[in-house]
Amino acid sequence: MTALTRSRPSVTPSPATFEHRTLPIALARTGLATAGLALLVLNTDDVLFSPTPKAPEGTFCSGATTASLWCLSQASGLPPAVPRTIAVIVLALVVIGYRPRWTAIPHWYVAFSLATAISVPNGGESAAQVITLILIPICLSDDRAWQWTPPSRPLRGHTRGLTYAAFLTLRAQASVIYLTAAISKLTVADWRDGSAMAVIVHHPLLGFPGTVTAWLESWSWWPFAATLMTWGTLVTEAGIALLLWGGRLARRLAFVLGAGLHLAITAFMGIAGFGLVMLSLLVLVALERRSTDVGSQEPHCPSSTGSSRPCLST
C-alpha cells in the first residue's frame, strides 16, 4: 500500500475495518434512551396522554399502534403505572449500557410505543423509533455484558458486513432528515424571504423567552440578524446532510454544526428531547471509529510466502 493510499481520507470505513463496538455508538444509545427516560420521568401521564380530537382517551390506538406498550396495557385493563414502569426499566438498562444484545429490541419497542401512543410528541420520538430499529442488527451482534468495555475478539466476517450495512442506513437516514428539513422550509414564504426567525421568536409555543426576544429586538441590526439566522439554519441543515458523506474531517464538521444547531434550539426554544435524539444520531454517524482504531481488527495469519494476511473468519 502506498503512502498516498494510506493518507487518503475515506468517505466511510470499509466493511473490512468497520467496528461498531465503540464509544460513539455506546454514547448514542445512552443518549437516545436518556431522551425517552427524561420524557417519562419529567412528565405525568396527564401531559403525555392528554385527550385530543383524534385520541379522546389520550392514547393513539389504531392499526399498528394497537401493538404499542400503552395500548396493549390499556386493552388489558392494566393500571397506567405498569407500562410506564416497564418502559423506565428498559430505558434505564440501555442508559447504563447493560447487555446491548438483550436490550436492543426492547429499546426499539419502547421507542415505538412512545412515538405512536403519546398525544404530544416533540419530533424526537419519531426519529428515535427509526434509529433504534436500525440499531437492532448492530446490537444483536454485540455479546458484551457492558457496552463500555472494549471488545475481546474481532467480529466475524458476515457479522461485520451486516452491521456495516446497518450503519450506512443510519447515515443515509440522518442525511435525509437534515436535507428534508432544509428543503421543506423552502416551501414556506417566510423561510424563502429570510423573515422566518423574526416570526418564530414570537411563536406562542416554540418562541424564545420574552426577555430574550425583547433583548434581540432592541438591537438596531436585528432585522439583518434575523435574516442571517434564517438562512444560516437552511445552509447548516443542507451542509450537514452533505458533509456526512465526506471524509473524517467533513463528518467532524457536520457534528460540530449539528451540535451548535441543536444546542441553540434547545436553549432558545426548549425542545431538549428532540435535540438530544438528534445529537445522539450525529454522534452515531459522524464520530464512528474503525476496528484499527480500537485494536479489534482481524487477526493475521502467515501465508506461504512468509507475509501476513488476514485470517478468514466464519
Image (cartoon, rainbow, N blue to C red):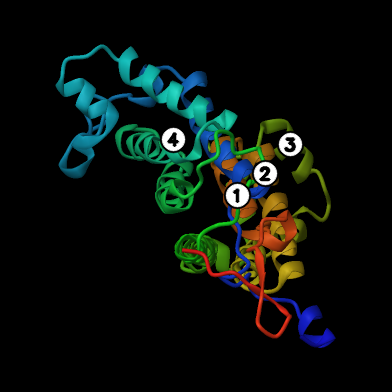
Residue at horizontal 53 percent and vertical 60 percent from the top: 174
User: What mark, if any, has residue 103 been given in the picture?
Assistant: 4
User: What mark, if any, has residue 150 been given in the picture?
Assistant: 2
Q: Residue furthest front?
A: 304
Disc 3 secondary structure class: helix
Decide if residue 296 is on the left or right side of residue 97.
right
Quote the CA–CA distance across marks 3 and 4. 42 Å
Within 10 Å of disc 4 (Cα), the crowding (few <14, some 14-19, many 20+) is: some
Pointer 3 and pointer 1: residues touching (CB < 8 Å)?
no
Of 202 and 96, nearer the camera is 96
Q: Position of residue 257 (x, y in %)?
A: 72, 58
Within 10 Å of disc 3 (Cα), the crowding (few <14, some 14-19, many 20+) is: few
Decide if residue 188 is on the left or right side of residue 289.
left
Quote the CA–CA distance across marks 1 and 2. 7 Å
Disc 1 secondary structure class: loop
Within 10 Å of disc 2 (Cα), the crowding (few <14, some 14-19, many 20+) is: some
Decide if residue 260 is on the left or right side of residue 173.
right
| Mark closest to the chain's N terminus, 3 or 4 | 4
| Mark closest to the chain's N terminus, 2 or 4 | 4
Write down the quadrant of residue 190 in the picture: bottom right
User: What mark, if any, has residue 145 been given in the picture?
Assistant: none
Pointer 1 and pointer 2: residues touching (CB < 8 Å)?
yes
Q: Is residue 208 visible?
A: yes
| Mark closest to the chain's N terminus, 1 or 4 | 1
Judging by the rendered image, the residue that carries numbered circle 3 is 212
